[in-house]
Image: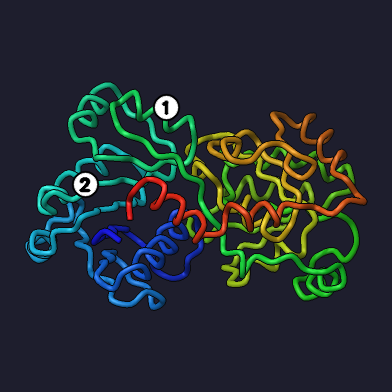
Amino acid sequence: MKRTVVITENISEPIDEGVKKFSYYLAKYISGLNSENRIFSVFGNSDIPDIRQLPKNKLFFSLVFFRFLYSYKPQLLVYIPSSSSTLMSFIRLVIVSVFSGNSEVIMISLQERKHNNFSKLIIRFLKPDKIIVLSNKESNYYKKLGINCIISPIGVETGKYLEISAIEKKRLRQKLALPADGKIILHVGHIKKGRNLEILKGLTAEGFYIVIVASTRFEPDIRLKGELQEAGFLFITNYVQNIEEYYQASDIYVFPVESATNAMEFPMSVLEAMSCNLPVLTTRFGGIESFLPESDWIKYFSNEDELKKKIMTIPENKECNNRKIVLSHFAWNNVFNNLFMSNNLQ
């Protein structure tokens, strides 16, 4: 394994949203490969020993930090910006790379970002050795800027997100105060207009219950929440430590987001639902379609009518195979092994 430094701005507990989750599992993976590897973060995490303090200023300026990089001479420098691949992220990375010697420099961009023409000129000049992205669309974008791209999916903690029996599901619904009978549709994420949650309203008339487990990281859109509650939506707004229970208590997962700025390029909740062996209906968002072909249990929709039609085509008497897909391709270790070994990053 190459001597590696990972820079991730925030892996503090709770690990409750996509960028944090990716950063956390990558940090655990890299620190477990070699005791000499180093993880830097503004905020630490008790699960990962020996996390080093990342400077809190916008340019990571710190003589202590720069001296460490200069003396450590990492062979691989990996940066996961919380704000994804903004112009400022490229500037930070090039400053840090000046002090890291001849290391291979990689940025991981987890959400789509667009840049004006002036920013594109600067990025062409500041480009890292490689950028890791989560979709073919993003890869094509950065290739046009002259950056060497690697496409990778995200992963999921398969030992946490498990399939349960029908009897266990019934007990879990009682524990969580969810409807005992009927089909429950779940969505996990922020309560804001850009998430396109309104498209789910029509499903209540079809007899479905809509449950939204809201992110605690961002303030909800109160007006939107009120409108959806009037339509019969059930919201869970407190932090849920065992969020897998809501997946396990549900029947179908729907990801309705269309706006690229409102979710990670490959939404983690889709894989979490699949790992619990739920059927998934999703928009053709980001990198999902790059890695998951349509099937009986994974269906794509573009509008409300298509959503209503396709949800009715989910087989009732066949066993869903989404968990098998996850176990084969999307467990975290499999994702990172493929990413680092296949691209000669180890």
Quadrant for the C terminus in the image: bottom left
Tell which of 76 and 157 is nearer to you.
76
- Residue at point 67% right, 58% down? 275
Left or right, residue 297 beside residue 160: right
| Mark 2: secondary structure | helix
Residue, disc 1: 140
Mark toward the start of the polypeptide (2 vs 1): 2
- Residue at point 32% right, 51% down? 345
User: Can you tell which of label 2 and label 1 is closer to the viewer?
Assistant: 1
Specify the color scheme.
Answer: rainbow
Q: Amino acid at mark 1?
A: Asn
| Mark 1: secondary structure | helix
Question: In this orientation, does residue 287 appear?
Answer: yes
| Picture layout, residue 238 above or below residue 299 | below
**CA gap, disc 2 to disc 1?**
21 Å
| Location of residue 320 in the rendering, given as x and y in whole percent from the top left corner | 80, 52
In the image, which disc is placed on residue 286? none
Tell which of 304 and 318 is nearer to you.
318
Tell which of 26 and 114 is nearer to you.
26
In the image, which disc is placed on residue 93? 2
| Picture layout, residue 152 above or below residue 217 | above
- Residue at point 54% right, 34% down? 259
| Picture layout, residue 192 above or below residue 145 | below
- Residue at point 78% right, 30% down? 306
Crowd class of label 2 (few under 14; some 14 to 19; many from 20; radius 10 Å) = many
Q: Amino acid at mark 2?
A: Leu
Question: In this orientation, does residue 233 appear?
Answer: no
| Location of residue 297 in the rendering, given as x and y in whole percent from the top left corner | 77, 45
| Location of residue 322 in the rendering, given as x and y in whole percent from the top left corner | 72, 52
Left or right, residue 64 beside residue 246: left
Left or right, residue 249 beside residue 8: right
Crowd class of label 1 (few under 14; some 14 to 19; many from 20; radius 10 Å) = few
